[in-house]
Image (spheres, helix red, strand yellow):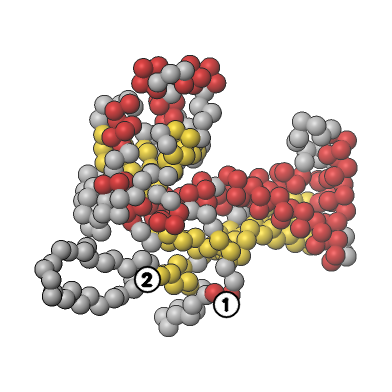
Amino acid sequence: MSACQTQDETRALNEALFEKLASTDPLLVKEAVDAVNDFTRSKMREDGFARAIMPFMPISNDELDRQVQTDKPVKIVDKEPDSPAAITVGFATLPDAIYIRGPRYPVTFARILSPKFTKDTDELRTWIMDIRQVLSDNAIKDMLAEEDGKFISACNTAIGAAGTTNVTSGVIQHQNIAGGWTRDTLWDGTTVLPSTPSNLEVQTSLVNNLTIKQINKLTRQEFGGDFAQEVMKNGWTSTEFMGHRWIITIKKGIIANNAWYMFAEPKFLGKAYELEPTTMYIKREAFMLEFFSYETIGSTIGNTNAVARVNIS
């Protein structure tokens, strides 16, 4: 409940929403559903770290590509072709012929569903908490975890196991660095991503909310200037550090302690599409109300050189 919203105001909003949900008028029911939908979509984009790293773009049916082997929606994305380096030659020498091939990769789509919630409508009559808040929070909780979990799983697949050479880049993109969180290990970590043939710099770092507290232990000498004092007084409030953006997540079941993921700019990383935005389905039969959220999205890491991971120990 908003701090400036009283219980009476919340109860009035709930009663208005309840009347629309309980109505047999399709227009009123649609108004109630739209009210929940608007709130759900804004929360989805605020809380999911995957969307902050690789933003989703809307896609329409006419932009999809048909496939022989499946009826499921697919989008084929072109990838920048590689080209050999220029060379110095003598006069009267023609260049070798290189046949141009344009690599492509598919973005396949899947539907994500929240659990289905049921409630007796008579039990909604006396609520003093904001029903819309409860509906949206419960409906998107598992969807956000599923979306972010699938994204990190794809990242782990792309970079491979710790200490192994990535078959695509020819370098190690998942490294273990000993020595704890220090100025040296932080800067050593930022060399992993640019070490690939793509020479990409880190634009976004992702750690969990316990790992960032280890970074907060850096001394004044390591932080430099008054930043150490600011962190000690106010905690980690900066989103820009070491020249790039940091995202802190509470999803410790997805981002392990002392794991540090780094990503290049979205244009180098891949593509993410939203075929059907987050929608709340609400159905009322007699006195029982049921509702759940769903969305249809697709994302693919098209360039494995744009992801790196470091484990600090």
Q: Circle 1 sits in a helix, a strand or a loop, which is it?
A: helix
Residue identifier under label 1: 62
Res. 22 image quadrant: bottom right
Relative to 194, say whether 30 is above or below.
Answer: below
> Where does residue 110 sit, x and y in percent of width and height?
51, 65
In this rendering, the answer to whether 204 lies above or below 167 is above
Query: Which residue is at 46% across, 38% downward?
Result: 246
Q: Amino acid at mark 1?
A: Asp
**Which residue was labeled with disc 2?**
104
Residue 295: % across, % down: 60, 61
Amino acid on which disc 2 is placed: Arg
Q: Quadrant of residue 210?
A: top left
Q: Is residue 74 above or below residue 282?
A: below
Q: Is residue 13 left or right of residue 58?
A: right
Q: Residue at x 44, y 72 (%)?
A: 76
Few, some or many residues within 10 Å of mark 1 (<14, 14–19, 20+): few
For label 2, the crowd category at 10 Å Cα-Cα, with few meaning under 14, some 14 to 19 and many 20 or more, is few
Residue 111 locus on image (x, y percent):
55, 63
Screen quadrant of the N terminus: top right
Q: Total marks drawn?
A: 2
Could you tell me which residue is drawn at 80 percent across and 62 percent down? 30
In the picture shown, does residue 179 fall above or below 274? above
Where residue 198 appears, as percent x and y from the top left, is: 30, 54
- Residue 177 visible in the picture: yes
Depth check, front residue: 285 or 177: 177
At a point 33% along the width and 32% down the height, the residue shown is: 186
